[in-house]
Amino acid sequence: MKSLWSDAEAAQFPGDLGQRVYTSRLLGRDKSLVLHGGGNTSVKIDGQDLFGRKRPVLHVKGSGWDLELIEEAGFSPVRLDHLVDLSTLEALSDPQMVNEMRTHMLRADAPTPSVEAILHAILPFKYVDHTHSDAVLALTNTADGERRIRALYGDDVVVIPYVMPGFDLARLCARIFPRDRKPATIGMVLLNHGIFSFGDTARESYERMITLVDRAERALDKDCVPAPAKAPRAATAARGELATLRREVSRVAGNPMIVASHTDEASLAFAQADDVASIARRGPATPDHVLRTKRIAMVGRDVDAFAREYAAYFNDHAPAAREPKTMLDAAPRVIVDPAIGVATTGRNARDAQVVFDIYEHTMQVIQCAQGLGGWQALPARDIFDVEYWDLEQAKLRKGGAAPAFAGEVVLVTGAASGIGKACVQSFLARGAAVIALDLNAAVETVAKRADFIGVACDITDAAQLGAALESGVRAFGGIDMVVLNAGIFPGGTRIESLGDAQWGKVMRVNLDANLALLRETHALLKLAPRGGRVVVIGSKNVPAPGPGAAAYSASKAALVQLARVAALEWGADGIRINTLHPNAVFDTGIWTDEVLAERARHYGLSVEGYKKNNVLRVEVTSRDVAELAAELCGPLFAKTTGAQVPIDGGNERVI
Ligand code: ZN
């Protein structure tokens, strides 16, 4: 591990707090040190109040901030003397501790200080850095972890036995650190938890962290006997199996869940390891992770068995807790299965991704510790105390309503432009994960976020469609909603000159491909935790065709008839299918300026007049159609199937 310090970069962060921001970001850049809000840093600065009285202040990372992206506003200023006073109390509950910290901040709108703030306060150094370094965790999470740490670091660090983060840990450190500190001491290792470093300057504290972690990495390189490399077998779980697993996970969780599969070599090798059933069920690398990953991974696919075991773990430990506890959902967050690889679950795709980011490191830490003679996690009791500590339970009670489609997945065709692209935004806004398909490769960049994948594919090609569905289901676990939007409109050809080729092409895209999509997604829709939903983008041309668009009108009419039959056939499977008939939506892929001008001329209107040529005299946009498509999948239409809804500003020929 190397220091990332650069004088030029550091110069852009003036002042003690600026330097604190800079080296915190350096720590945050290295994912083997801190992940997703893990770790924390602080700086002590002499301040003055409005009356000129000296007031030393601890600026400590606020909760909700990530070290990699932290700014000055992310540090909570808390009165240092008060924090030190708190460390001398016999006992303080965590909610009381948070109250004391919040009521002794110097900025009313600052975030809640880290629960490790008192610990930062009692360390007599200007800068303090704390990480959950993978290498240090691999060393301490072994049978003789304490001996290894002491042998490696000697007097350079003070060693603190495991105590749950919060007041008790701060108090213990306040007792042990002054007693065990030697002149050489530059850090502190918390067994089964992480490591601290400190110094007079931001650079000194940061570089001591790097030095200490580098020594742990070298020790691992020397002692760790890696498992014999065996190329993993490819994942063989079919999309139906993944969707079945997701349905089970969602049932146990009590709401739809995203299940994201990872089939990279490391994940598959871990899932196929001979001892996986043992090592994946011993506990997390650091208690901090339990809130994301649950205590242990589920090995295999028996979700009910996992849920029973989880309930037993809760019932074993909850009665002894100080406060009454509410059990969290009993669904797994990490699933390891030889045919799947590693699947992670979450209420949304971002959560599932965070779980994977953490577990990727957990797998490495486990394997290293195995090489040192055996991975050993904390006892279940200690993990339970973190998973169910008062502060987390309070957050759970506060909750907040989840978005309408949280945990659900929609597939949208023709998603690179127009109505399809607008649907991507409307469904994302309602919390759904989106699988976007389009012939145009631009679909891959319609959105850049954890809950979106764009797949360039020709939906008239069975192999390409199958592959797109596979990647969609691997990414999110299933498909709950489908928007059949892709279509082509070669306008202005009268029947007497309409060739078979053009007719055939329109039918293949607008009709045949949609039959294939319905057929191939039926099994997935049937497994949707809240029931499947399909929205067909029809056309005003179905109830009111226009001359010159025979192939288009006929294809859309046939598609609508197909949808009506699907509504009849699939009702018993809990799948709703409804059709929208938009008209004159001009911000779409098929309406080139040329086609628009031609159509306007055809009706003897200006382009502007043609756009609002409806009963309400309004322009209908892609967004209008997309919002209605999303609502058709929502609870308002829960009891509607086989319906056709116009969205056209009112059309005299339709009304
Ligand atoms: Zn920590």
Image: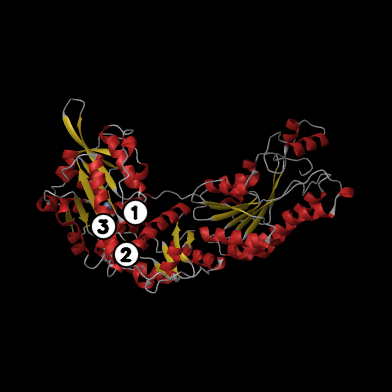
Left or right, residue 478 beside residue 485: left
- Asked if the residues shown at circle 2 and circle 3 are in contact, with their CB atoms under 8 angstroms apart, the answer is no
Instruction: For the C terminus, give its image quadrant.
Output: top right
Q: CA distance from mark 1 to mark 2?
A: 13 Å
Q: Label 3, on which residue?
A: 216
Residue at horizontal 35 percent and vertical 41 percent from the top:
70
| Residue 477: percent from left, percent from top | 52, 61
Kind of residue sitting beneath label 3? Ala
Q: Label 1, on which residue?
A: 32
Determine crowd level at label 2: few under 14, some 14-19, many 20+ residues with C-alpha closer than 10 A. Answer: many
Query: 105 or 275, which is in the foreground?
Result: 275
Kind of residue sitting beneath label 2? Cys
| Residue 598: percent from left, percent from top | 79, 37
Q: Label 2, on which residue?
A: 368
- The numbered dot on residue 4 is none
Determine crowd level at label 3: few under 14, some 14-19, many 20+ residues with C-alpha closer than 10 A. Answer: many
Residue 160, image quadrant: bottom left
Tag nearer the camera, 1 or 3: 3
Query: 385 or 471, which is in the foreground?
Result: 471
Q: Could you say whether the residue bearing mark 2 is in a helix, strand or loop?
A: helix
Residue at horizontal 73 percent and vertical 31 percent from the top:
608
Q: Earlier in the sequence, mark 1 or mark 2?
A: 1
